[in-house]
């Protein structure tokens, strides 16, 4: 983390983020946090303070933590049909893509950096991405968004909601993962896999 970006966090906050050391360390911290079920858009500072996050907040927090450890602060948006979108933080290691994420579903979290393309990475979420009707719902993915573009809005430390990031994700282009003639014929998750996905699920 450099220059004005570094100065936006306190010294203790910077130490905490840097202590995570790498993407897997960031993921471990997020896994330890309770899932945040409120309709909020907290900054990384508030996530650190409150020790809870949902999918969007976790991805943005992970982007800030990645930045503190020498990676660009990248997030990627995945859109779903008859379901909620999923936002993940993405990073590259030795030329391969990985992801950091928090979800109310067990299989939509961390990905090791083993994916050659972003489409491969997004497709790794497809089989487990479902709604409560057990329908496989993932349809599109975006290119990575570098959150440095929002430094002037103090996205890492503001006390205000980060809905401007959500609005930007709505506006950018998303790429289809599957043609429609295939998505019309998808089968639902079987009961055992669905129960596994819902293991530990937080309720409002």
Image (cartoon, rainbow, N blue to C red):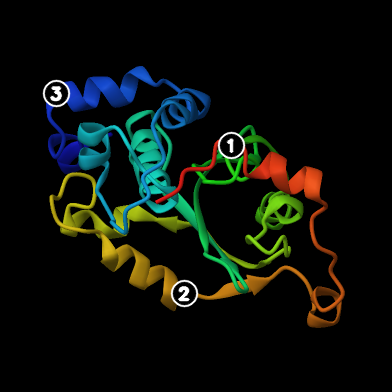
Question: Which quadrant is the N terminus positioned in?
Answer: top left
Identify residue for label 2.
172
Compared with 180, 130 (above or below) is above
Foreground pick, 199 / 102: 199
Q: Position of residue 27 (x, y in %)?
A: 49, 30
Q: Kindly report the distance in space between the C-alpha atoms of the residues bearing marks 3 and 1.
A: 28 Å
Q: Position of residue 112 (x, y in %)?
A: 65, 33
Q: Residues within 10 Å of mark 3 (few under 14, many from 20)?
A: few
Say whether disc 2 or disc 1 marks the residue closer to the N-terminus. Answer: 1
- Residue at image location 67% in from the left, 44% down from the top: 197
Say whether disc 2 or disc 3 marks the residue closer to the N-terminus. Answer: 3
Compared with 160, 10 (above or below) is above
Q: Position of residue 53 (x, y in %)?
A: 36, 42
Q: Kindly report the distance in space between the C-alpha atoms of the residues bearing marks 2 and 3.
A: 34 Å
- Residue at image location 65% in from the left, 54% down from the top: 118
Q: Horizontally, is 189 left or right of 157 in the view?
A: right
């Amino acid at each position: 983390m450099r220059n004005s970006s570094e100065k936006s966090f306190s010294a203790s906050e910077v130490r905490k983020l840097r202590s995570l050391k790498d993407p897997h360390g960031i993921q471990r911290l997020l896994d330890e946090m309770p899932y945040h079920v409120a309709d909020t858009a907290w900054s990384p500072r508030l996530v650190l303070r409150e020790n809870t996050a949902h999918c969007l907040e976790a991805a943005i927090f992970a982007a800030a933590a990645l930045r503190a450890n020498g990676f660009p602060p990248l997030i990627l948006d995945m859109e779903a049909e008859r379901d909620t979108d999923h936002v993940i933080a993405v990073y590259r290691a030795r030329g391969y893509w990985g992801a950091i994420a928090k979800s109310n579903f067990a299989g939509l979290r961390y990905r090791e950096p083993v994916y050659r393309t972003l489409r491969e990475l997004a497709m790794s979420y497809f089989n487990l991405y479902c709604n409560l009707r057990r329908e496989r719902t993932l349809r599109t993915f975006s290119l990575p968004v570098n959150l440095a573009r929002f430094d002037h809005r103090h996205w890492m430390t503001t006390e205000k909601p980060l809905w401007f990031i959500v609005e930007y994700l709505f506006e950018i282009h998303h790429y289809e993962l599957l043609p429609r003639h295939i998505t019309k014929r998808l089968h639902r998750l079987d009961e055992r896999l669905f129960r596994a996905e819902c293991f530990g699920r937080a309720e409002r």
